[in-house]
Amino acid sequence: MTALLEIRDLKVSFVHGKRSRPALDGISLSVDRGRTLGIVGESGCGKSLTALSIMQLLPSPPARIDGGEITLTLDGSSRDLLKIARKEMRTVRGREIAMIFQDPMTSLDPVYSIGEQIAEVLMTHEGLSRPDALDRAVKLLRDVGISSPEQRVRQYPHELSGGMRQRAMIAIALACKPAILIADEPTTALDVTIQAQVLAVMRGMQRSLGTALLLITHDMGVIAEMADDVLVMYLGRIVERGPAAQVLEQPAHPYTQGLIASLPSLDMPHGERLIPIQGTVPSLAAIPTGCRFHTRCPHVMDVCRREEPAMREAAAAHDAACWLIGRAP
Amino acid sequence: MTSAMSDRSLLSVRNLRKDFPVSSGFLRRTSGAVHALNGVDFDIAAGETLGLVGESGSGKSTVARTLLRLVEADAGSAMFHSRSLAAAGMVSDIDLFTVDSRTLKHVRRDIQIVFQDPYSSLNPRHSIAVNVGEPLRANRICGAVERRARVAQLLEVVGLRSDLMQRYPHELSGGQRQRVAIARALALEPDLIVADEPVSALDVSIQAQVMNLLLDLQQKRGLAYLFIAHDLSVVRYMSRRIAVMYLGRIVEMGEANEVFRKPRHPYTEALIESVPETKPRLHKERILLQGDVASPMRIPPGCPFHPRCRYAQDVCRRELPPLREIARGHIASCHFAEQMPGADRASRREVAV
């Protein structure tokens, strides 16, 4: 069976004059209906760039797609999103793949009411009349857990709290029942109690609509809570992939291990120290030779400085790109 | 150092209040007020960390700002023991809120602040050397030559190479900038650092590095911190004692271990339950908190938390519960604090597994 969305060997670089810097170097992933794929990594690792490539919203220039395929398979027919016409992409966007961002205030239009913004999507993609679209907007707001939606539908973004704005964004994103929802740090700007509410809304919607969710976050807790599978990215490459539970409990790549060891937890006894990853993420202009993580890796060996490791199996369905895998300890 | 070791507080805040007037309409008449702080009391002992946690709008940053006199408190006192004043042979215990501006200048050496976004608190047109050396220059501590040497030393203390001195803030990474801000805060050898969300903007690996740096500095220099953050795990890691704020009031305060194991306020309990669990197998059946934080312009009557509280009774809608001691050194403001289930997290999780 083909996956709903499959990316194969995607390469993107940033071009400045004659120089080009690889930002995504051979990204492959797939998402199925009703599943959640989490993408984690620190800033600059390429998480958001991957999402923007799928949506064809890369800032270009300076971004340039150097190769790869992004295949969307719906009702048995496949299309490469990198090859289809702009106009066709516009119907894919919003209708088949929707996206929500970290800061809803910048993606909502401040001069239109929430209801008008939801209705616009329905009028554009589903051809509903304005009154019908507004009725549906009320229903959608109720579905995402907004109280008194009849009043809220007439309000403007600045009149809503951060949590409500993010729910409104989810309502807009799900208005056309897209097959895929890409959520880029959807709860990062929210308080924890509101984050818990918004995550619950997303889970509920996914269950009732069967939407595939591509969840981008730096928060391992959110991954643990939401994701079936997880990809860990570092400097434009995938360094580890596998079932979320497996990766979080038995991380195979030293980078993933370091990320998890850097996280304070509520259950940590006071006085116990975290062991952070040394150093900082190098810039794209100075990607290290060999394994990109070798400059910060506590287990670095000679081979790591020379050759980039390929993905190898660490456990069933769990791969990581590290020379240590399969080596006798 | 624990609070028990020092019989005297470094800082003692009582009944801190702050309203921000809100004006509206064509004539910009004052039409109401944001009740940011509604009577806040706490103490910090020398060398201790008090963690202040709460959601947006709880007033935690306003506490920081009033202490530094970046905004003026409306009422209350903040008694501070100033080493600089003592060294200058002046009265060393002063109220930060009423002290005159000349004395305040001395006291500012003893209290420093580190903000969330170092990029907006560092001067982008000055090199790192000038930024870090500025407090030394402004307070006429030493001449240019010695200043350079001290700046180099400060950068080393926060784990930066001294060759960064000639760089400018935009050339550094977020983590490096926060280290620079910490170096500047250390320049005058303060006794108290108010850290307002100092690691929230940093990536996880850098966040852990900066937190460890703050802990090391505390150990070496006997610094006290008022550590403000919205992230419970971060506050937990940094502080032995924590205070939980909701709508301009402290609703619970005590030893972090106690508070997290046996929360005595339903809001604290809800905060703890909202933190996503990183171990997928330990997923909890959580009870979600309903609704948003009420607006600080219209604080609900009675217990301000009652509209979101799952235990709310009639009395909660009528009467504001006083902040009272529930167990030794553990205070909470809930009518039903004693009846809180308080089942500790560990046992609850065993059930979940």
Image (spheres, coloured by chain):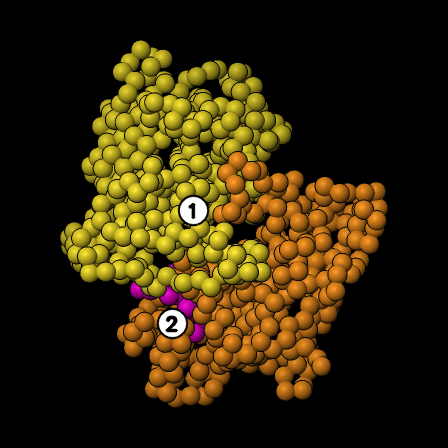
Chain colours: A orange, B yellow
> Viewer-proximal residue, B186 or A13?
B186
Label 1 CA crowd tier, 10 Å (few <14, some 14–19, many 20+): many
Label 2 CA crowd tier, 10 Å (few <14, some 14–19, many 20+): some
The subunit letter for the residue under badge 1 reads B
Residue B336 on the magenta segment: no
Please give the name of the residue rendered at 72% of the width and 54% of the height, measured from the top-left corner.
Answer: A252
Do discs 1 and 2 belong to a common subunit?
Answer: no
Region rendered in magenta: A159-171
Instruction: Identify the residue under disc 1.
Output: B260
Instruction: Examine the residues drawn in magenta and state their main secondary structure.
Output: helix
> Viewer-proximal residue, A117 or B314?
B314
> What amino acid is labelled 1 in the image?
Phe
> Image quadrant of residue B91?
top left
> Image quadrant of residue B2?
top left
Q: A203 left or right of A19?
A: left
> Viewer-proximal residue, B342 or B225?
B342
Observer able to see residue A56: no
Measured from the top left, where is residue B313 in percent x and y? 23, 60
Nearest to the eye among marks 1 and 2: give it.
Answer: 1
Q: B350 left or right of A249?
A: left
Q: Quadrant of the C terminus of chain B?
A: bottom right
Q: Which mark is residue A145?
A: 2
Residue A166 on the magenta segment: yes
Measured from the top left, where is residue B321 in percent x and y? 22, 49
Please give the name of the residue rendered at 49% of the width and 23% of the height, measured from the top-left corner.
Answer: B221
